[in-house]
Image (tube, rainbow, N blue to C red):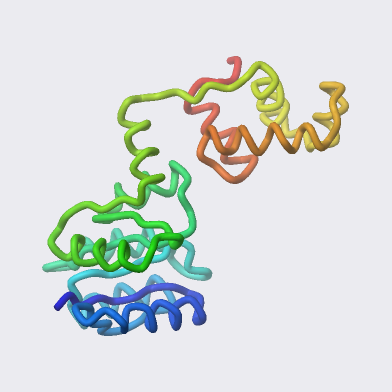
Amino acid sequence: MTTILLCDDHVVVRAGLLALLGSEPDIEVLGEAGSGEEAVALAAKLGPDVVLMDLQLGAGIDGVEATRRITALPNPPHVLVLTTYDTDADITRAINAGATGYLLKAERPEDLFAAIHSAAQGHTTLSPPVANRVMAQMRGTRPTLTERELDILGQLARGLGNREIARALFISEATVKTHLGRIYDKLGVDTRAGAVSVAKEQRLLPS
C-alpha cells in the first residue's frame, strides 16, 4: 500500500483525482491540501509516502517552495509533481527543489498509478515530454531559431507589442503570432517575458 497526500488548489481537480486514485486498491489518500502551506503542515503530520504536488497554488507559496520545505522535513516523503506546466524553468525549479518525479496532468491513469508507486520507492519518474526537455538541457542543446524568429525575438526584447513588431518587420500581426508560437515551443516557455529571459540565458540575442 502506498499512502499519498494530494495538493492542488482547485477543488474540482482534487475531487477528480480523489475519485481516480480511489479506484486503485494499492493507493491510499491520507489527506488533501489546497495550498502550499497546508501541504507542508499535513506532510509533517500525516507522513505519507508520496505528496502529489501541483506547481501553481494561487495565493501563498507555490508548489516549488512547498516541495523544498517538504523535502527538508525529518524523514520526508517523496514529492511527485503533477501539473500542466512543462517549461524548462518549471521543470528545473521543481527538480532542484527536491521533486522525485515530474508528471503532466495529461498522463493516462495507469501511468499515474505506476509513477506514484515508483516515487514511493525513490525512483525518478518523468513524463516523456519532460524527459526530453531534461535530456536536451543535459546535452546543452541550444534551440535553433530561424532568422525571422530571431528578428521577432529581438523586437520582443525591446518591449514591442505584436502590432509594433508587425510594422517594424513589414509583416502581418497574424504572422507575428505564428512565429511567436514557434519561438515559445522551441524555447520551452509560454510568455513573452519567458522567451526573452531564455533567449538571454542562451545568448540568442545580439549583445
**Image coordinates for residue 25, horizontal then vertical, percent:** 22, 82
Q: In the rendered image of this protein, does residue 82 appear above or below residue 48? A: above
**Image coordinates for residue 45, horizontal then vertical, percent:** 21, 82
Q: In the rendered image of this protein, does residue 7 appear above or below residue 107? A: below
Q: In the rendered image of this protein, does residue 154 appear above or below residue 92? A: above
**Image coordinates for residue 11, horizontal then vertical, percent:** 49, 81
The residue at the point 59 percent across, 38 percent down is: 184
Q: How many tags in the picture?
A: 0
Task: State the residue in front, 90 or 183.
Answer: 183
Q: Quadrant of the C terminus?
A: top right
Q: Which of the 4 image quadrants contains residue 44? A: bottom left
Task: State the residue in front, 124 or 79.
Answer: 124
**Image coordinates for residue 162, horizontal then vertical, percent:** 79, 37
Q: Quadrant of the N terminus?
A: bottom left
Q: Is residue 174 left or right of residue 16?
A: right
Q: Is residue 145 left or right of residue 17?
A: right
Task: State the residue in front, 116 or 65.
Answer: 116
The residue at the point 24 percent across, 55 percent down is: 100
Task: State the residue in front, 158 or 4.
Answer: 4
Q: Which of the 4 image quadrants contains residue 155? A: top right
The residue at the point 56 percent across, 38 percent down is: 185
The residue at the point 85 percent across, 36 percent down is: 163
